[in-house]
Amino acid sequence: MNLFDVSRVHCDSSATCDIENWIAQIGSPDSGCFMMPRTPSPTKRQKGLDLEATPTNLMSLSQLDSASISTSDVTSDSGASRRSANPKKRERELRQASDYPLRRDLISNYPKPTPLMKDLYALQDAAVIPSTVKTALTKDSTWANQPRQAWFYEVGPKETTQQTSTDADMYSYTRLRQIRENTILCKTRMEHEAGWNDSVHAPLLEVALSGESGISYRNVTCCRVLPDFLQDNQSLFNVKIDYAILLDFPPKSSLASAVRTFRRPDPRTRHATPLQLPDNPDTPTVIPIETKSATADMISGPVQLAAWAQLHFAYLQRLPSAGGELPVLPVIFVHGARWRIDFAQRTTDELVSPASVLFC
């Protein structure tokens, strides 16, 4: 049992069914792509190094082909690097794009909230912590941060018959307590993004997804965009995120079979994700996570996630099941210890990003 038992909150399974049905329709790939290349405007001066930007992947000497390096390649690469150092300019480019320009909106203005949106709002006031850890949590909390009674749910008689259940809860609590201590330390040290990722975000994702089947996470900081997408849209060159939540289906499931069937003709060109993962797995990327330190600005992360949404929908558009409405994409921005969940949707003429729930 996970310490935070979100299964006790009513969860409409239609959100999962939408994704599963969408994947099940996969057949042969579509050669079309909705993105149009966009030439970046030149900058007037060299930008300084952005210590909080997700680092780009360095190419090894063995990957360099002198015959393929041209002036246009160098110009494109340097232009992408300059764009990443100026998030406001990149935001303007996304909003002024000729195809599917970005529009940001409030979640309250969203006409048809998805089941996931409703569930996330329900979590804000839900009891998700088992009462088995209440005594320990109260003891470890200061007078100014005592836990609220509404946070806890009573563990039923059947759940208390096994000591292993309580032991598992206390083990998860011990790990979360260490993550909290690491969080305080990162704030005190004014730690950079890499420090937050190592000591806070990765351990928290590990605890959250422990024991969950069909889903996993990976650090994709150094993963490039697949070259096929760069040919269609050079503005996707510098799309970077820190973590990706992936669908990791059981090998014998129908969804895993659907992905394998789609990729079987040529696994080198038919990918389950638009990122160049080292093992080229059969695990579709469903949620991007971009992290920033507590001292970073609040603009860069959402801009990077909006650029990722462009890439994500460009990938989905190539699949045969893209004939209908594309699924809404949840995106997660982590600023220090604050987790914010937004959503991205591609309509017929624009990319909409309504702001959503903030978890501290």
Image (cartoon, helix red, strand yellow):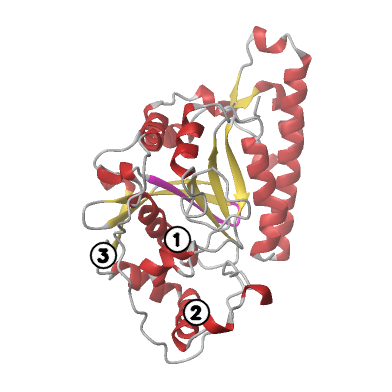
How far is mark 1 from mark 3, CA to CA? 19 Å
Label at residue 99: 3
In the depicted structure, whether residue 101 falls above or below residue 283: below
Disc assigned to residue 77 = 2
Cα distance in 3D space between marks 2 and 1: 22 Å
Q: Nearer the viewer, residue 146 or 13?
A: 13
Question: Is disc 3 surrounded by few (<14), some (14 to 19) or many (20+) residues within 10 Å?
Answer: some
* Element type where label 1 sits in the image: helix
Q: Quadrant of the N terminus?
A: top right
What x and y, as percent, mark residue 291? 57, 58
The amino acid type found where label 3 is placed reads Asp
**Magenta segment, prevailing SS (helix, strand or loop):** strand
Type of amino acid under label 1: Pro
Amino acid found under the numbered disc labelled 2: Asp
Residue drawn 63% across the image and 11% down it: 156
Disc 1 and disc 3 in contact, CB within 8 angstroms: no
Magenta residues span: 329-337
Tell me the residue at 44%/85% (across/down): 72
Which mark sits nearer the N-terminus, 2 or 3? 2
Secondary element at tag 2: helix
User: Seen from this angle, which residue lies furthest front?
Assistant: 265
Q: Residues within 10 Å of mark 1 (few under 14, many from 20)?
A: many
Of all residues, the one furthest to the left in this rendering is 348
Q: Which residue is mark 1?
A: 302
- Rendered image quadrant of residue 250: top right
